[in-house]
Amino acid sequence: MDDEPLARERLRQLLADQPEIELVGECADGREAVDTIQKQSPDLIFLDIQMPELDGFAVLEAIKTEPMPVIVFVTEFVSTKSFE
């Protein structure tokens, strides 16, 4: 679940070569993610940390699925801070 279409496309490309993974949903914001997760009950979720409506942590608090799916947090946040 990621609000950036290019990031979602890249994840789809990376997962396409994995025959044991079936894509069952894709969402553009946190509220849509909660609804989709509750309806689909996926085993694995790639979840963006920063999304419109609800961030990734709020999505985790809102879902009520058992067992809890495996969560992989993804982000395309890039810091401009120098580490020199």
Image (spheres, rainbow, N blue to C red):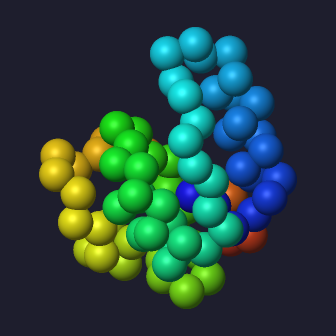
35 or 81, which lies in front? 35
Image point 42% across, 50% down: which residue? 40
Q: x, y percentage for residue 7?
A: 74, 52
For the N terminus, the quadrant is bottom right
Q: Is residue 52 left or right of residue 45?
A: right
Image point 45% across, 69% down: which residue? 35
Outermost residue on the right side: it is 6
Q: Quadrant of residue 9?
A: top right
Q: x, y percentage for residue 22?
A: 55, 28
24 or 81, which lies in front? 24
Work out whether 36 lies above or below 40.
Answer: below
Q: Can residue 82 be seen by looking at this rendering?
A: no
Q: Is residue 1 left or right of residue 54?
A: right
Q: Can residue 70 be seen by looking at this rendering?
A: yes
Image point 40% across, 58% down: which residue? 39
Q: x, y percentage for residue 36?
A: 48, 61
Outermost residue on the bottom side: it is 53
Work out whether 11 lies above or below 60.
Answer: above
For the C terminus, the quadrant is bottom right
Work out whether 43 lies above or below 47.
Answer: above
Outermost residue on the front side: it is 39
Q: Is residue 51 left or right of residue 79?
A: left
